[in-house]
Amino acid sequence: NAGVTQTPKFRILKIGQSMTLQCAQDMNHNYMYWYRQDPGMGLKLIYYSVGAGITDKGEVPNGYNVSRSTTEDFPLRLELAAPSQTSVYFCASTSLAGVDTQYFGPGTRLTVL
Amino acid sequence: KQEVTQIPAALSVPEGENLVLNCSFTDSAIYNLQWFRQDPGKGLTSLLLIQSSQREQTSGRLNASLDKSSGRSTLYIAASQPGDSATYLCAVEAESGADGLTFGKGTHLIIQP
């Protein structure tokens, strides 16, 4: 199993540009999450999904959108990128929330200039 | 709102020492508490997960305890090695389960050879 994969690993955007961060898992997990990590800080939840077709906002959803059309994929869309969105983005998944640990991807480092 | 605090923020010790990392949380309504390891530029690796009904979990040289009523957890690392150098993150999962983890800012650990 590849686990949780994320692409791209690095990206530089200009203010106002848009992009999609890709996340995929091959463990047949229903629960998937997007977090962001700012320097010296813990991770903060952006969006989460409990299954295909179901998504919900986390703590810091402004400026982002998600979709979940399949169990495997959970892309994160940034519209009109701003410098405040410069961060490292992590995708995670788990088989059963509250019981199993979350498995994290390697992250996408995004810089908005 | 759940808040997770980790003390100390940074720690540097000689190889071979036993050490304790501390984590506290403000809301005791949790499903579980998890400890992760993060290496520079990498994703998170799960170390231990303690369910709210458990008092401790052990894996090799690692032992994590949980006192849910007082909102505290400790991660004990025995016989530290240079390879243990990393950032250790504590996270709690709320009883609602599906809405992700709340993380502390982490303890940056350096083990001196």
Image (spheres, coloured by chain):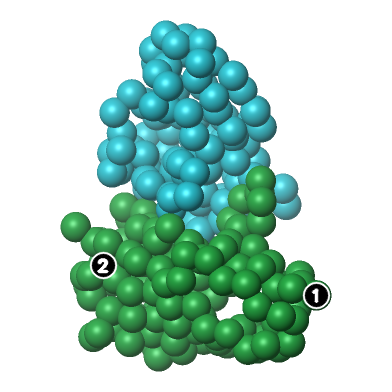
Chain colours: A cyan, B green
Residue found 25% across the figure and 85% down from its top = B70
Q: Are marks 1 and 2 on the same chain?
A: yes
Residue B98 coordinates in the image, percent (x, y):
33, 55
User: Measured from the top left, where is residue A74 in percent x and y?
Assistant: 49, 35
- Give the quarter of the image for residue A16: top left
Question: In this rendering, does residue B38 appear at all?
Answer: yes
Q: Nearer the viewer, residue A32 or B62?
A: B62
N-terminal of the pair, mark 1 or mark 2, is 2
Q: Which amino acid type is marked by label 1?
A: Pro
Q: Residues within 10 Å of mark 1 (few under 14, many from 20)?
A: few
Residue A107 x/y as whole percent: 60, 41
Q: Nearer the viewer, mark 1 or mark 2?
A: 1
Judged from the image, the secondary structure of the residue bearing numbered disc 2 is: loop
In the rendered structure, the residue with mark 2 lies on which chain? B
Q: Which amino acid, mark 2? A: Glu
For the residue pair A100 and B85, the one nearer the viewer reads as: B85
Judged left or right of residue B108, residue A44 is: left
Residue underneath mark 2: B95
- Which residue is rendered at x = 73% and y = 52% of the image? A1
Question: Which residue in the protein does label 1 denote?
Answer: B113
Residue at x-position 54% and y-position 24%: A111
User: Which residue is at a point 31% across and 33% down the rendered structure image?
Assistant: A61
Q: Chain of mark 1?
A: B
Residue A8 vs A79, above or below: the answer is: below
Residue B36 can be seen, yes or no: no
Judged from the image, the secondary structure of the residue bearing numbered disc 1 is: loop
Residue B106, given in percent of the width and then of the height, sits at 48, 62
Left/right placement of residue A4 relative to residue B67 reads right
Quarter of the picture containing the N terminus of chain B is bottom left
